[in-house]
Image (cartoon, rainbow, N blue to C red):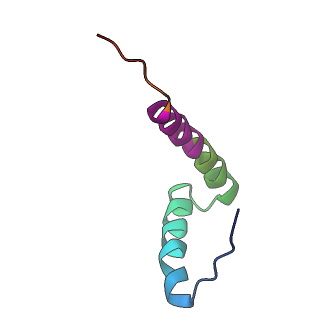
Amino acid sequence: MDRILTLDSRQEAAPQATADRFVSVYKGDVMKALKEMIVLNGRLQEQLDAHSAPRRATR
């Protein structure tokens, strides 16, 4: 990380609400939600890598 951001209470409320909803999907099991988020992030990273890979010119 290059920088540490400091959020005020208003800015913190939106990500906190999103996190609360995500954890509630896993019935309050924070560890299960964290593991699922890691898996989801890995899949998204693979998709980004696939899109940013140099493409061969075909004719």
Instruction: Name the residue: 53% across, 62% down.
Output: 24
Residue 19 lies, in percent from the top left, at 54, 66
Residue drawn at 68 percent across, 71 percent down = 3
Res 51 → quadrant: top left
Where is residue 58 drawn, in percent x and y? Answer: 33, 12
Q: Residue furthest top?
A: 59
Query: Residues in magenta?
Result: 40-52
Residue 5 point in image, percent of width and height: 64, 77
Q: Inspect the magenta stretch and tell me whether residue 29 lies in it.
A: no
**19 left or right, relative to 59:** right
Residue 1 relative to residue 52: left or right: right
Question: Is residue 5 toward the left or the right of residue 44 in the image?
Answer: right
Front-most of residues 29 and 49 = 49
Vertical comparison of 32 with 18: above or below: above
- The rendered magenta stretch, by its main secondary structure, is classed as helix
Which residue is depicted at the point 56% across and 89% down? 9
